Image (cartoon, rainbow, N blue to C red):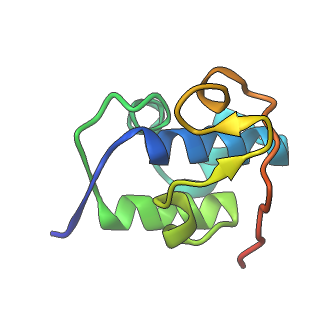
């Protein structure tokens, strides 16, 4: 079972995508098949390692690629390390669509 080391990048990217797309926690939980507990742990960076299949399911539910979700990005108004992590309404420089 392959795992992805969890850090603030995945959590931040999930929150930014949700805010930009207007997705709620129930929306993502329903579309991903993850439990609310698991999803909340990922979204708040309160988990160590996450199964690769879980991140794939999450990426699919958000309409993003797995690679995009686990890669640090620069966001308008700041970088991931400070401003975006405290702002649910942050805008991204590029939010690609993946189907």
Most extreme residue toward the left, as rendered? 1
Position in image of residue 35 (x %, y %): 43, 40
58 or 7: nearer the viewer: 7
Q: Is residue 26 visible?
A: no
50 or 88: nearer the viewer: 88
| Quadrant hosting residue 51 | bottom left
Q: Residue at x 43, y 38 (%)?
A: 8
| Quadrant hosting residue 79 | top right
Side (left or right) of 76 relative to 30: right
Position in image of residue 36 (x %, y %): 48, 33
Side (left or right) of 94 relative to 46: right
Q: Residue at x 63, y 55 (%)?
A: 31
Q: Residue at x 81, y 30 (%)?
A: 89
Side (left or right) of 35 relative to 82: left
Quadrant (top left, top right, bottom left, bottom right) of the C terminus: bottom right
Position in image of residue 26 (x %, y %): 66, 36
Position in image of residue 98 (x %, y %): 71, 76
Most extreme residue toward the bottom, as rendered? 99
Asked if residue 59 is positioned above or below residue 85 in the image, the reply reads below
**Number of marks drawn:** 0
Side (left or right) of 27 relative to 13: right
Quadrant (top left, top right, bottom left, bottom right) of the N terminus: bottom left
Q: Is residue 85 visible?
A: yes
Asked if residue 10 is positioned above or below residue 42 in the image, the reply reads below
Most extreme residue toward the top, as rendered? 86
């Amino acid at each position: 079972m392959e795992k992805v080391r969890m850090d603030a990048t995945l959590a931040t990217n999930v929150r930014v995508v949700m805010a930009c797309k207007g997705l709620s926690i129930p929306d993502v939980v329903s579309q991903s098949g993850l439990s609310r507990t698991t999803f909340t742990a990922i979204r708040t960076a309160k988990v160590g390692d996450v199964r690769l299949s879980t991140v794939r399911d999450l990426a699919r539910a958000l309409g993003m690629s797995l690679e995009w979700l686990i890669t640090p990005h620069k966001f308008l108004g700041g970088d991931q390390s400070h401003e975006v992590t405290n702002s649910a309404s942050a805008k991204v420089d590029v939010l690609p669509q993946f189907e």
